Amino acid sequence: MKPALKVENLRKSFGGNEVVKGISFEIQPGEIFGLLGPNGAGKSTTINMITGVSSVGSGKVEVFGIDNQADYIGTRRLTGVMHQEIVVDTFFTIDQALKIHSGYYSVPDDSSWRNLLIDRLALRPHLKKSMNKLSGGMKRRFMVAKALIHKPKLLILDEPTAGVDVELRQNLWEFVREINQKEKTTVVLTTHYLEEAQEMCERVAIMNHGNIIALDKTSSLLEKLDEKKFFIHLKEKALALPDVLASFDCHLLNDGNTLSINLRGETKFNDVLMGLAKCGLTVRDVETKSPSLQEAFLKITKSNRAAHA
């Protein structure tokens, strides 16, 4: 089976400054894949080359086995993209724009599919409005509908929930999961909300300074942190951090009622409990917190920044 997306040694420069530096990765059909990185990492430039918005500097992009430079029309028909920037088109109403948009890809209008998108993205009350009459959240819903109107096999979402409310985020991700499962749509997601990527993406690639600095299953990246966090809720208030715990990564929270502890490497949780017992503090409850993708992201990009310093 051919990859849904294959990027091979992709490069791009602007004014002599190389912003994408020979990256390579593959995404399999049916995946929800996260492309993450800080601002200026090269994510949007990469997406623009994949979708044909920007020319490829050098390297190769294939969408389901089709070279996007040799057959631009074929790959565009297979790809739907929602760009980070909101582009306002005042010439058509929402209804008119959705009716004609699939024709840009030489795909006939499917009224059943179009109405499904309208209802699932809550656009029906706004069909007679032009885009400049919509709120920011509604503009993003409309852009998602446009990206999907021609039933692409590959959907690319570049910061789809930037600046939108929590309810829209939840509704959008429910819909993305639905089309991924029912329509077998492959999804590429960029987002600064890393909890979204952790929840949605089985695999993620992290970009920084134009390079891919990590590419793995989300679960594997979290396992590599080798860190566990505990919150110990005390029966008695601790006025200060006991000296016996000074060697641990500990902090007092909630006015001394809670002890936050990060355990790394060979440090044992039992050693912390023994330290508490020595200083006469009694444990009321223990809460554990799993490592997050945000913590993995910060650790990986910090190490990469140090290597470039």
Image: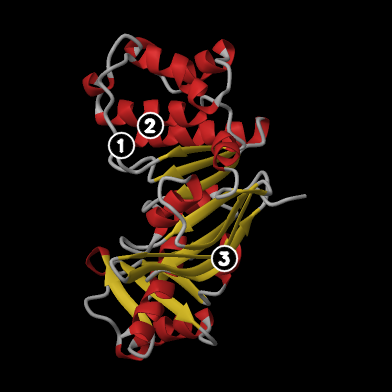
Q: Tag 2: Cα neighbours inside 10 Å, few (<14), some, or many (≥20)? A: some
> Does the image show residue 289?
no
Q: Amino acid at mark 2?
A: Leu
Q: Name the one closer to the observer, 258 or 37.
A: 37
Reading the image, the residue beneath label 1 is 164
Mark toward the viewer: 3 or 1? 3
Reading the image, the residue beneath label 2 is 168
Quarter of the image containing the C terminus? Answer: bottom left
- Sequence-first disc among 3 and 1: 3
**Which residue lies at the image location 44% right of the left edge and 56% below the top edge?**
46
Q: Amino acid at mark 1?
A: Val
x%, y% of residue 100? 45, 16
**Which residue lies at the image location 45% right of the left edge and 22% below the top edge?**
101
Question: Separation of disc 3 and disc 1 at Cα?
Answer: 32 Å
Looking at the image, residue 72 sits to the left or right of residue 123; the answer is: right
Tell me whether the residue at label 2 lies in contact with that at label 1, contact meaning CB atoms closer than 8 angstroms: yes
x%, y% of residue 155? 53, 39
- Which residue in the rendered view is the most extreme toward the right? 1
Under circle 1, the secondary element is loop
Q: Name the one closer to the observer, 194 or 231.
A: 194
- Sequence-first disc among 2 and 3: 3
**Which residue lies at the image location 46% right of the left edge and 62% below the top edge?**
293
Q: Tag 3: Cα neighbours inside 10 Å, few (<14), some, or many (≥20)? A: some
Is 305 located above or below residue 247 in the figure? above
Q: Amino acid at mark 3?
A: Ser
Q: How many marks?
A: 3
- Give the quarter of the image for residue 170: top left
- Determine which of the numbered discs, if any, sits on residue 24 in the image: 3
Under circle 3, the secondary element is strand
